[in-house]
Image (cartoon, rainbow, N blue to C red):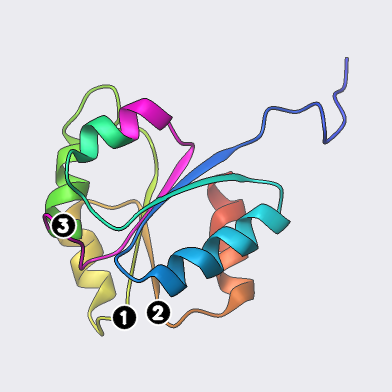
Amino acid sequence: MNLNKEQEAQKKVFIFDDNTMILELCTDILNDLNYEVKTSPTANNIELQVSEYMPDLIFMDNSLWGMSGIEATRLLKSNERLKDIPVVYFTANSNVSDLAEKAGADDHIAKPFDLFEFEKMVKKYL
């Protein structure tokens, strides 16, 4: 039986970023694409935050309140229950590729990002 778009389980995206404008922009984009979105400006209790929501994809900024995106991503990737959730590192740092690799992220995108590239990255994992 084929399900139409409204009947399909809505995919969930969790965005960690300390910039509320980025959180609002990404939420608007993802809601328009019919994804459920949760945001957090802090990485405090990162494993608990992610466990309670169980997203299908995570966007992780480098600069967060509580701990760095590198530390947060490493914690997620070392957790047996959470390690398979794709983490896309996104930051305005010029060395986003190196930071993503250091963190153990699955992918990366530089800020400011092109909306098309952001959507393409989301669709790559969802």
Amino acid at dot 2? Lys
Amino acid at dot 1? Ala
Residue stretch rendered in magenta on the structure: 50-67
What residue is drawn where x is 29% and y is 66%? 18
Tag 1 near tag 2, CB within 8 Å:
yes
**Quadrant of the drawing holding the N terminus:** top right
Q: Earlier in the sequence, mark 2 or mark 3?
A: 3
- Find numbered disc 2 in the image and state the secondary structure of the residue it sits on: loop
| Side (left or right) of 106 relative to 30 | left
| Side (left or right) of 41 relative to 126 | left
Counting other residues with Cα less than 10 Å from the Cα at mark 2, is it few (<14), some (14-19), or many (20 or more)? some
Query: What's the CA distance linking mark 2 and mark 3?
Result: 16 Å
Q: Earlier in the sequence, mark 1 or mark 3?
A: 3
Q: Earlier in the sequence, mark 1 or mark 2?
A: 1
Depicted 43 relative to depicted 53: above or below = below
Counting other residues with Cα less than 10 Å from the Cα at mark 1, is it few (<14), some (14-19), or many (20 or more)? some
Residue 70, labelled with which disc? 3
Residue 106 picture location, percent across and down: 34, 51
Residue 111, labelled with which disc? 2
Amino acid at dot 3? Ile
Depicted 100 relative to depicted 58: above or below = below
What residue is drawn where x is 64% and y is 73%? 116
Give yes or no for residue 51 being in the magenta stretch: yes
- Find numbered disc 3 in the image and state the secondary structure of the residue it sits on: helix
Query: What's the CA distance linking mark 1 and mark 2?
Result: 4 Å
Residue 7 picture location, percent across and down: 81, 26
What residue is drawn where x is 35% and y is 71%? 19
Q: Which residue is mark 1?
A: 92
Residue 6 picture location, percent across and down: 82, 33
Give yes or no for residue 114 being in the magenta stretch: no
Query: What's the CA distance linking mark 1 and mark 3?
Result: 14 Å
